[in-house]
Each structure stands twice: as C-alpha cells, then as structure tokens.
Image (cartoon, rainbow, N blue to C red):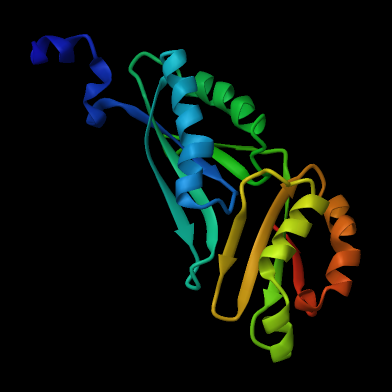
C-alpha cells in the first residue's frame, strides 16, 4: 500500500522536486512566523495543489537581532514555479509583507516584492539615569508606539540586546509612522537618545 501511495504522490521524493525560497524582510519571531506566515501560506499552497511549506529559518546578526527570515516551499511535480511565485506574492503582500522581501526560484531567478514600510526604534539600555530605568516601563513604550503607528492588536516584534532594546513596526509609510511617534519619543524619559531607523 505504501508503494502504491508513493506512485500517486510524485512529490514525495524531495530530491526530485523544485523549491522556492521566500525571504521575508520582517523581524518576526520564529514562533510568530509559523503562525502568521507559514501556516496560512501552506493552506494556500495545498488548496491549489501547488506544493507545501517544507521549512523555514531565521537569520540573525552577531548580537542576536533578527535580520530576515526564510520560508522554503517544495513545489509539486508538473507545477510551474513562476506561476506559483506569481500567486504567493499577492497572497503575502495582503498580509503586509515588508518591502525588501524576495522570492527565489531554484537559486536562480529572484523576484522582489513587499508593500509595507518598517520603522525600528532602539532604546538606550545603559546610558540613562538609574531612576529612568527604575520608574519607566518599556512595555508602556511598546503599547503607546503600537497605538501611534497603527500596530495595536498586531504581532509584537522586539529584540533585547546587551546595550539596546528595539521595537519594530510596519505600516504604509515610514515617514508617517515616524511623525506620529515624534512627540511621545521626545517627551518620554526612557526614549531619550533613542535611534529611529527605517528598516523597510
């Protein structure tokens, strides 16, 4: 029975299948990546018989900060990689994939995509007065900035390093998000000296 099953499932041997790699310019945590991107994408691929999500990974800097993440797609036999790529790009863009993302077909053709822009704010974790760290709450900063950038209710993206803590936000316009947080950042003590950077 197992041999018969293999005959009607020609994609079962990974050595003979083609692959698509989706690189997401998104500083999303691995578990959240699975829930937010991989599971819905796999359902989409299965629905049309295109293939399946076969893996994923996260690229980090030496400090541990996320740079980007990958999703590997195994394409079923007799399916067009380019057709599938043209299908998954609008699907992922509808989920807010940031600019600077890319789809690579069999390590040869790369297609750039993404519509959202990204803003990161890096809070100084070592140079402020002790009373600032004792009296101010980084969770409050994240909550307020999420509201101001239109990210309330969305996934929380963050990183805590040895000298800085970063919060990441995505939306239609980096400049509009930056303008929306300027007053709060300039007035809240924990944001003193914070770096605001465009990440997408």
Task: Specify whether residue 109 is in view.
Answer: no
The image position of residue 57, as x and y in percent, is 41, 49
Q: For this view, does 27 lie left or right of residue 35?
A: right
Q: At 25% across and 26% down in the image, what residue appears?
A: 16
The image position of residue 137, as x and y in percent, is 69, 71
Q: Is residue 155 above or below residue 7?
A: below
Q: Is residue 48 above or below residue 157?
A: above
Q: Is residue 160 or residue 198 the one in the foreground?
A: 160
Q: For this view, does 184 lie left or right of residue 112?
A: right
> Quadrant location of residue 87?
top right
Q: For this view, does 42 lie left or right of residue 24?
A: left
The quarter of the image holding the N terminus is: top left
The image position of residue 34, as x and y in percent, is 46, 40
The image position of residue 31, as x and y in percent, is 45, 47
> Quadrant location of residue 119?
bottom right
Task: Specify whether residue 154 is in view.
Answer: yes
Q: At 35% across and 20% down in the image, what residue appears?
A: 76
Q: At 48% across and 68% down in the image, what residue appears?
A: 64
Q: Is residue 125 above or below residue 30?
A: below
Q: Is residue 103 above or below residue 181?
A: above
Q: For this view, does 91 lie left or right of residue 61?
A: right
Count of numbered circles in the view: 0
């Amino acid at each position: 029975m197992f041999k018969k099953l293999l005959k009607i499932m020609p994609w079962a041997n990974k050595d003979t299948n083609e692959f698509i790699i989706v690189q997401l310019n998104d500083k999303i945590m691995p578990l959240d990546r699975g829930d937010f991107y991989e599971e819905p994408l796999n359902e989409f691929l299965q629905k049309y018989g295109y293939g399946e999500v076969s893996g994923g990974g996260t690229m980090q800097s030496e400090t541990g900060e996320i740079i980007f993440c990958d999703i590997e797609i195994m394409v079923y036999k007799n399916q067009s990689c380019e057709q599938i790529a043209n299908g998954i790009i609008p699907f992922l863009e509808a989920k807010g994939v940031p600019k600077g993302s890319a789809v690579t077909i069999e390590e040869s053709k790369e297609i750039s995509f993404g519509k959202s822009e990204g803003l990161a704010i890096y809070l100084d974790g070592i140079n402020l007065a002790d009373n600032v760290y004792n009296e101010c709450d980084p969770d409050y900063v994240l909550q307020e900035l999420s509201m101001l950038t239109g990210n309330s209710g969305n996934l929380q993206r963050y990183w805590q390093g040895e000298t800085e803590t970063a919060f990441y936000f995505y939306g239609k316009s980096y400049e509009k998000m930056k303008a929306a947080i300027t007053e709060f950042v300039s007035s809240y003590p924990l944001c003193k000296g914070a770096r605001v950077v465009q990440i997408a």
